[in-house]
Image (spheres, helix red, strand yellow):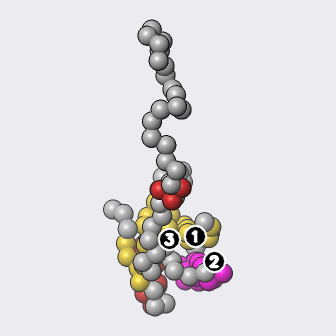
Amino acid sequence: MRKGTRLVYSTELGRIRSDSKANNVEQPDDSVCRVRRETKGRGGKEATVIWGVPVSEVELKSLGKAIKQKLGTGGSVKDGEIVVQGDHVNTVISFLKEKGLQAKKAGG
């Protein structure tokens, strides 16, 4: 580097990760469904999100439909998560336990 230059960004120096696995960190599959309440990004409305369900995509959609029918509310299933409108965390946890799945409350 020459004296008097103001180098802001360079790709020549520094540590470059060659391990692609380090960038794709995922939760380990411990066969526990996690349930949380969310309001961020939803215009202040509450939603219950279920993720980490150890079933296939088809079974996930049928489970999401069963949960929505039990609660009488709307929602969606995408990206491996079930999103149900409203705050139904405790009801969803008890429903999942009735179905034989392990479930726990996540978040605050």
Distance between mark 1 and mark 2 Cα atoms: 7 Å
Tag 1: amino acid:
Gly
Q: Residue at x 54, y 55 (%)?
A: 20
- Residue 100, image x, y percentages: 46, 91
Spot occupied by residue 27 in the image (x, y as percentages of width and height): 45, 67
Looking at the figure, which quarter contains the C terminus?
Answer: bottom left
Q: Please name the residue that numbered disc 3 is placed on.
A: 51
Relative placement, left or right, of 90 versus 9 is left
- Is there any visible trace of residue 11 in the rendered image? yes
First in sequence, mark 1 or 2: give its number: 2
Mark 1 residue crowding within 10 angstroms, few (<14) / some (14–19) / many (20+): some
Q: Which residues are magenta?
A: 57-72
Marks 1 and 2: CB-CB under 8 Å? yes
Dot 2: element: helix
For marks 3 and 2, give the CA distance: 12 Å
- Type of the residue with mark 2: Glu
Dominant SS type (magenta): helix
Q: What is the C-alpha distance between the residues marked 3 and 1?
A: 6 Å
Q: Residue furthest left?
A: 108
Determine the residue positioned at 50% across, 55% down.
19
Q: Is residue 31 above or below residue 108?
A: below
Which label sits on residue 80?
1
Specify whether residue 63 is painted magenta. Answer: yes
- Mark 2 Cα-neighbour bin, 10 Å: few <14, some 14–19, many ≥20: some
Q: Residue at x 48, y 64 (%)?
A: 26
Residue 57 bears which disc, if any? Answer: 2
Whether tag 3 and tag 1 are in contact, CB under 8 A, the answer is: yes
Res. 69 in view: no
Secondary structure beneath disc 3? strand
